[in-house]
Image (cartoon, rainbow, N blue to C red):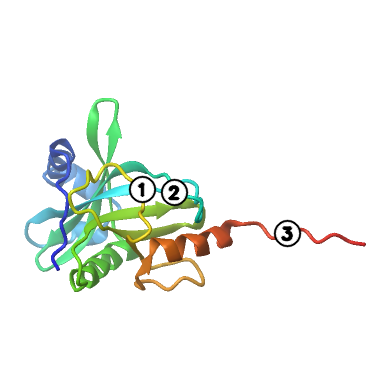
Amino acid sequence: MPLHVPPAPAPALRSVLTALGSPTAVREARTPSLRAAQGPASPELPLPVHVLDHITGTTGPSPTRLAGWRFLVRCGDRAVAAADTMLTPDGWAFSHFFEGPYVTSTEHALRQAESLPKAYQPRLLSVPELYMLTLWLHGDVTADAATGHPAADDILVPLAPAPPGIAAHRPHRVAELLPVLTLRLTPPRATLLA
């Protein structure tokens, strides 16, 4: 099924296009692959980046907050970098370019998701407590991409590099993965000495 990629806010897209058109912004970016890219670079596949600050396990929906929008920057037939935007008091603004494993891992996970039998709205979900980023496949394709929380039947695909013991690119239902993540964050009980 095709993914229903939500449209990014127009000011976020404009800020990335402006940064890509600025020789100074591209030259000063710490992204050798973007600086060395031949031909025009274009921002594609805007994904809202949500942050899961506190995992609540199975006691109810875990609250998330929108942290920004991420665009894969494509040059030719592949993504060479990503561009992040952030919300400021004046609206959406370009934040930075970056490259690394999450760029190729995101592209790989999106290709995987396109082969699923159900349509999803792709988002990114960051779990800072575990230094983890996942592709969040939200089941309600008409939902506002800037709001919401992971539903039990939504799919999370951990991106590489994933935390130890969690397989990258293996899809999990939220109801299955969040309890595992909760256990990873629960401190071990102190044993009482008799």
Quadrant containing the C terminus is bottom right
Question: Residue 105: where, in percent of width, then height?
Answer: 30, 67
* Mark closer to the chain start, 3 or 2: 2
Name the image quarter holding residue 183.
bottom right
Q: Residue at x 19, y 74 (%)?
A: 115
Mark 3 touches mark 1? (CB < 8 Å)? no
Which numbered dot is residue 62? 2
| Tag 3 residue | 189
The answer to which of 102 and 111 lies nearer the viewer is: 111
Horizontally, residue 174 falls left or right of residue 190, namely left
How many numbered discs? Answer: 3
Mark 3 element type: loop
Q: Residue at x 57, y 62 (%)?
A: 184
Instruction: Characterize the local packing of mark 1: few (<14), some (14-19) or many (20 or more) Cα atoms within 10 angstroms.
Output: some
Of residues 94 and 123, the one drawn nearer to the viewer in this rendering: 123
What residue is drawn where x is 46% and y is 60%?
Answer: 178
Mark 2 surroundings: few (<14), some (14-19) or many (≥20) residues within 10 A: some
- Please say whether residue 6 is visible from this viewpoint: yes
Left or right, 128 with reference to 95: right
The kind of residue on which mark 1 rests is His
Q: CA distance from mark 3 to mark 2?
A: 24 Å
| Cβ–Cβ under 8 Å for marks 2 and 1 | yes
Quarter of the image where one finds residue 23 = top left
Q: Is residue 100 visible?
A: no
